[in-house]
Amino acid sequence: MREWFSWLALKMVEIVGSTVTFVITLVAVVTWLLIGPSVGFSERWMISFNTGICVVTFLMVFLIQNAQNRNAKALHLKINEL
């Protein structure tokens, strides 16, 4: 299970850190902003986007922590070799 999670986390970090993902996210935010006036900046409009952002942020924290832990472990192993 641990190996599977490490593999998945590594792939997700590669995907999420790409330029394509940034552009897709930027387009999603701009689209959300452009839709706002047509729905009267309703509460549902704001809550739906905020909920999505909270969920993604929560998951990204764990991916970032996993990548940081892996990098720190590799760095310590290299330092110990010296």
Image: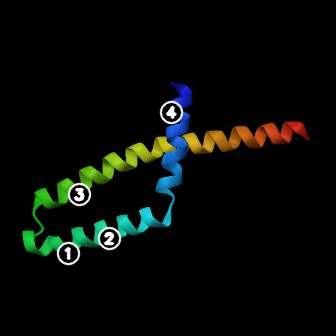
Secondary structure at badge 2 equals helix
Q: Position of residue 43 (x, y in %)?
A: 12, 59
Q: Position of residue 72 (x, y in %)?
A: 69, 42
Q: Mark 4 or mark 1: which is in front?
A: 4
Q: Are marks 1 and 2 in contact (CB under 8 Å)?
A: no
Residue under pointer 3: 49
Q: Is 40 or 15 nearer to us in this picture?
A: 15
Picture disc at residue 5: 4
Picture disc at residue 27: 2
Residue at the location (88% across, 37% down)? 81
- Tag 3: residue type? Phe
In whole angstroms, how far apart are the C-alphas of marks 1 and 2?
10 Å
Q: Are marks 3 and 1 in contact (CB under 8 Å)?
A: no
**Between disc 4 and disc 2, whose residue precedes?**
4
11, above or below 38, in the image: above
Secondary structure at badge 3 equals helix
Q: Is 53 or 1 nearer to us in this picture?
A: 1
59, above or below 35, in the image: above
Q: Quadrant of residue 23?
A: bottom left
Residue under pointer 1: 34
**Between disc 3 and disc 1, whose residue precedes?**
1
- Tag 1: residue type? Leu
In whole angstroms, how far apart are the C-alphas of marks 4 and 2?
29 Å
Q: Quadrant of residue 49?
A: bottom left
**Between disc 3 and disc 4, whose residue precedes?**
4
Secondary structure at badge 4 equals helix
